[in-house]
Image (tube, helix red, strand yellow):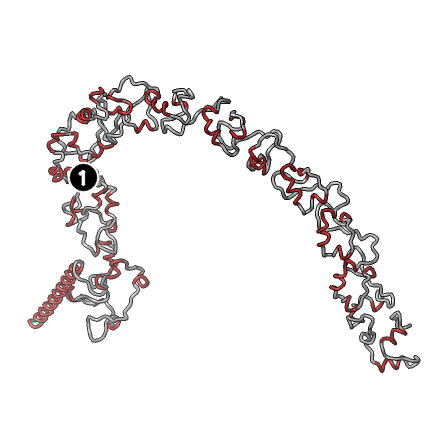
């Protein structure tokens, strides 16, 4: 019994030792896993020695060579590959794709047990459940750092905008580094107490501005406070002025809102014009704006300032600093200009002194005299223009000084002289007056065309007007727009064409009219509408075709008329309706019926230069011996074409 008890005690001791070793191993593994979340990480399929000893592989396959390389317990086979998504249906993404396999696959138990617990199955919840159980709301698989916190913060009572979106969490949440994001104050002064204490320009604490920071400040930037001056809106130069310029001595209550409250010294110091001496109102806004002290805009309601008056110095009109009771008429200031003007002489011409009738305030010149209703006495202002005009010379020609006869009040040029006896049209409109009125003589000028254009008439040779006896009434053929092209009226012209068209007759080569002896009665073939095409009347023409058509005869090669010695009596085969479709009269041998119908000329006449030669034996398929046998009863039989034709003149074998 004692031996047996001793044996049991030893077994129990070994079991306790084994359990203790396993516990230590699991503790080391747990520490290694916990430490590896923060420590170095080895290759995915290996195990870093920094993590401690490898946990037992009791549940792994017994064939170590599936994963390990021989010769080293820690070396994994280089060609070891495992498609986790394909083999398990669970894809490894982000940081999980780089994690060591033994992080999840070890002897602590099946992976499914830990995966069912979500992220907390492997990762400790440092937030202690205060931010919920869904880690993926803030964290991703790529990195442990939170993502999208600004967008999620927008759903809280304090959205992160402006500079707040760039600060670290622990600036507002003191326990953020330990995962504590308990609610914190949303009041500006609770976070910005130090900024409030430093704000001395102006001194916020002295003014009692210790809360409600958002009334002046925005979360975009702390500086450039945006206090709303609802009682006195800041515009123009006031918007960029420092607060102490208006609120001297740090007094922000009861500051004056009228201009003179701040600008009395400016009012007193102004000399252009002297405001105080002239008794100007201290309501500065009447003339000035907050954009700039100058230029001012005094209300000249009694005499509006326009044009050059806007830029004029006040003293130009208000001499001696007198600003009241000034006359409002132009001449009161501009009498000297009126008296000194000579173009035209205002005083001599007794022009009215109401300057505004012709002048504007923009510029003294150019004046715009209102000519409405002016129909005479132009010369009072325009004598110099009359005397200086040389095209034509008005004074030398004795033109009347009633300018309105030719000119209008709109423009001095062009003038419109009334050529009632000879209306100006076409080229005459642009012609210089001297072209017709030579020597400056403008009266008694003849109106007939030939009076000016007789030399043109005499020099014209196409056709020769003088030798042809053309009338000198040029307007029958010509117009004033252009000398050419003339438009001769051929209506009723039935003869005498050669008077104008002799040169055309002599120059015509197709056909050559002169060489052929064509008549000069052009109207027989041509019309007055167009020179070509001509319409020759072939009616009754039965001979002498070659006179016009010799070129056609020489150029014909199907058949070659000249080489074959065809006669030039074209009418033998052709008619006057059309050149093609000739009908040759083959009266010596019928070719329009029987076996010889539709044969070409060359089949019987192989020599194109001599259509008197013909052949019969080249077409008929029989030998000389055979034909000799058939003609043994024919006296004087000979096997040649002429002999064939002598016996068979009609092409019939039975003849």
Say if residue 257 shows up in the picture: no
Q: Residues within 10 Å of mark 1 (few under 14, many from 20)?
A: few
Which residue is the site of mark 1?
Answer: 223
Relative placement, left or right, of 543 versus 108 is right
Q: Quadrant of residue 510?
A: bottom right
Residue 347 against residue 496 in the figure, above or below: above
Q: Can you name the residue that lies furthest to the left here?
A: 2
Q: Quadrant of residue 585?
A: bottom right
Residue 566, position in %: x, y? 80, 66
| Residue 395 percent coordinates (x, y) | 51, 29
- State left or right for residue 451 relative to residue 610: left
> Which residue is at a point 22% across and 45% down the rendered structure image?
165
Q: Residue at x 77, y 69 (%)?
A: 563
Residue 65 showing in the rendered view: yes
Residue 171 in percent (x, y) is at: 16, 45
Depicted 262 relative to depicted 174: above or below? above
On the image, the x and y values in percent for residue 257 come to 20, 25
Mark 1 secondary-structure assignment: loop
* Residue toward you, 481 or 362: 481
The quadrant holding residue 453 is top right
């Amino acid at each position: 019994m004692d031996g047996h008890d001793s044996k049991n005690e030893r077994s129990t001791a070994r079991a306790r030792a084994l359990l203790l070793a396993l516990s230590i191993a699991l503790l080391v593994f747990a520490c290694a896993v916990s430490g590896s979340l923060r420590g170095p990480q080895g290759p995915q399929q290996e195990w870093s020695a920094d993590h401690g000893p490898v946990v037992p592989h009791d549940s792994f396959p017994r064939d170590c060579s599936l994963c390990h390389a021989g010769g080293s317990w820690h070396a994994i086979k280089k060609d070891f590959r495992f498609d986790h998504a394909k083999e398990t249906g669970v894809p490894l993404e982000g940081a999980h794709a780089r994690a060591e396999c033994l992080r999840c696959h070890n002897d602590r138990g099946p992976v499914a047990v830990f995966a069912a617990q979500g992220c907390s199955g492997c990762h400790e919840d440092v937030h202690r459940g205060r931010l919920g159980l869904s880690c993926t709301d803030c964290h991703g698989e790529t990195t442990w750092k939170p993502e999208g916190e600004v967008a999620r913060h927008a759903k809280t009572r304090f959205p992160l905008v402006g500079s707040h979106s760039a600060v670290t969490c622990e600036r507002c949440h003191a326990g953020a580094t330990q995962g504590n994001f308990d609610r914190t104050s949303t009041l500006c002064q609770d976070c910005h107490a130090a900024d409030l204490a430093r704000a001395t320009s102006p001194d916020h604490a002295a003014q009692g501005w210790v809360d409600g920071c958002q009334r002046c400040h925005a979360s975009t930037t702390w500086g450039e406070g945006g206090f709303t001056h609802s009682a006195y809106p800041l515009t123009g130069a006031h918007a960029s002025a420092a607060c102490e310029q208006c609120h001297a001595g740090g007094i922000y209550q009861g500051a004056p809102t009228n201009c003179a409250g701040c600008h009395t010294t400016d009012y007193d110091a102004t000399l252009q014009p002297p405001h105080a001496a002239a008794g100007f109102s201290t309501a500065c806004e009447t003339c000035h704006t907050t954009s700039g002290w100058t230029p001012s805009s005094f209300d000249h309601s009694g005499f509006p300032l326009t044009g050059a008056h806007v830029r004029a110095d006040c003293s130009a009109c208000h001499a001696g600093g007198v600003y009241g009771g000034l006359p409002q008429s132009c001449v009161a200031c501009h009498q000297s200009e009126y008296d000194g003007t000579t173009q035209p002489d205002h005083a001599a011409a007794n022009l009215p002194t109401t300057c505004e009738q012709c002048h504007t305030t923009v510029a003294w010149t150019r004046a715009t005299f209102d000519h409405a209703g002016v129909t005479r006495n132009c010369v009072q202002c325009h004598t110099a223009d009359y005397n200086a005009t040389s095209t034509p010379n008005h004074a030398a020609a004795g033109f009347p000084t009633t300018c309105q006869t030719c000119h209008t009040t709109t423009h001095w040029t062009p003038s419109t002289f009334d050529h009632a006896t000879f209306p100006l049209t076409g080229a005459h409109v642009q012609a210089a007056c001297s072209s017709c009125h030579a020597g400056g003589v403008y009266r008694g000028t003849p109106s007939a065309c030939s009076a000016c254009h007789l030399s043109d008439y005499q020099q014209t040779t196409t056709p020769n007007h003088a030798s042809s006896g053309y009338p000198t009434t040029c307007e029958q053929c010509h117009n004033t727009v252009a000398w050419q092209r003339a438009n001769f009226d051929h209506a009723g012209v039935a003869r005498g064409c050669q008077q104008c068209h002799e040169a055309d007759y002599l120059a015509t080569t197709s056909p050559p009219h002169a060489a052929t002896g064509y008549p000069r009665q052009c109207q027989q073939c041509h019309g007055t509408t167009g020179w070509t095409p001509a319409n020759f009347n072939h009616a009754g023409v039965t001979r002498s075709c070659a006179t016009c058509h010799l070129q056609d005869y020489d150029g014909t090669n199907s058949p070659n008329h000249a080489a074959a010695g065809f006669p030039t009596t074209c009418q033998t085969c052709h008619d006057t309706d059309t050149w093609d479709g000739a009908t040759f009269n083959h009266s010596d041998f019928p070719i329009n019926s029987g076996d010889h119908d539709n044969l070409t000329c060359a089949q019987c006449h192989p020599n194109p230069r001599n259509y008197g030669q013909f052949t019969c034996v080249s077409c008929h398929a029989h030998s000389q011996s055979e034909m000799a046998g058939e003609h043994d009863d024919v006296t004087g039989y000979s096997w040649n074409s002429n002999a064939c034709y002598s016996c068979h003149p009609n092409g019939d074998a039975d003849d």
